Image (cartoon, grey):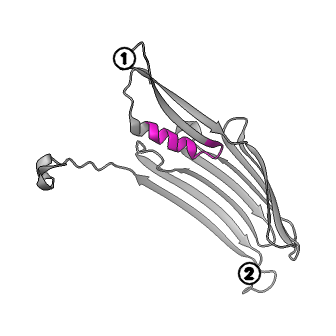
Amino acid sequence: EEGSYIDPYELADTERILRNLNFISDAKVEVLPLDDQPGWADVAVFVRDRWPLGVKGKIVTKDRYSAEFFHRNIGGTGLNFEWEVPVNRTKEPSRGRRLRLSYANILSTFTSFEVQTRTDWEKEEYSGALKRDLVHPGIKFVGGISASRTTDKDVDVLPEGTHLRRDVLDPWIGWNFRSVMEISAAEWPNGKR
């Protein structure tokens, strides 16, 4: 903000937060002093994007492998989409799917959401989460809620054709407070800092 003091800790937090975004490869915040106005400076933010589109593959054995397509920054909004197709030719059905949609920092509130579905020979799962983590020291309240429904299909200890279903709801809330301790020079050992 124009006219405000530059806080090096806030600049370092800005770099760290930007680097943690999955579509940013690197970020750097620089203070550029203004030659014609002593005591004033501009703050420049430089970011290097990652290529947002990608394909990944994983081979476990000749019968078990997977392929994934992803887009890390749909329309430049930070929306993340993943689509994975796992294959296990020794199981029935032999092919599955996993879809995931996520978004970080909704409306600059450090709140994120994620929804995911997975269906394959082992399980069928639907999950979603909305959370606000402690990513910045200025955040006072954190919390979230996640919900999932998982049906395990391949459970060895149960009779064949029996499925095990779990429903989980996990809300949490927290409060961040700073503890500041002032110590005078006389209280330090030998009176020195």
Q: Position of residue 107 (x, y in %)?
A: 57, 36
Task: Please state, as top left, top right, bottom left or bottom right, where the N terminus lies in the image.
Answer: top left
Q: Looking at the image, which residue is at 55% across and 62% down?
A: 170
The picture quadrant where one finds residue 47 is top right
**Amino acid at pointer 1:** Pro
Label 1: state its secondary structure.
loop
The picture quadrant where one finds residue 98 is bottom right
Q: Which residues are magenta?
A: 11-25
Q: Looking at the image, which residue is at 15% across and 47% down?
A: 184
Give left or right: position of 64 versus 180: right
The picture quadrant where one finds residue 68 is bottom right
Give whichever of 60, 90 is nearer the camera: 60
**Amino acid at pointer 2:** Val
Give whichever of 149, 41 is nearer the camera: 41
Give left or right: position of 50 versus 168: right
- The residue beneath circle 2 is 155
Give whichever of 8, 70 is nearer the camera: 8
- Classified by dominant secondary structure, the portion drawn in magenta counts as helix
117 in magenta:
no
* Mark found first going from the N terminus, 1 or 2: 1
- The residue beneath circle 1 is 38
Mark 2 Cα shell of 10 Å, populated few (<14), some (14-19), many (≥20):
some
Mark 1 Cα shell of 10 Å, populated few (<14), some (14-19), many (≥20):
few
Q: Looking at the image, which residue is at 45% across and 36% down?
A: 11
Q: Nearer the viewer, mark 1 or mark 2?
A: 1
Label 2: state its secondary structure.
loop
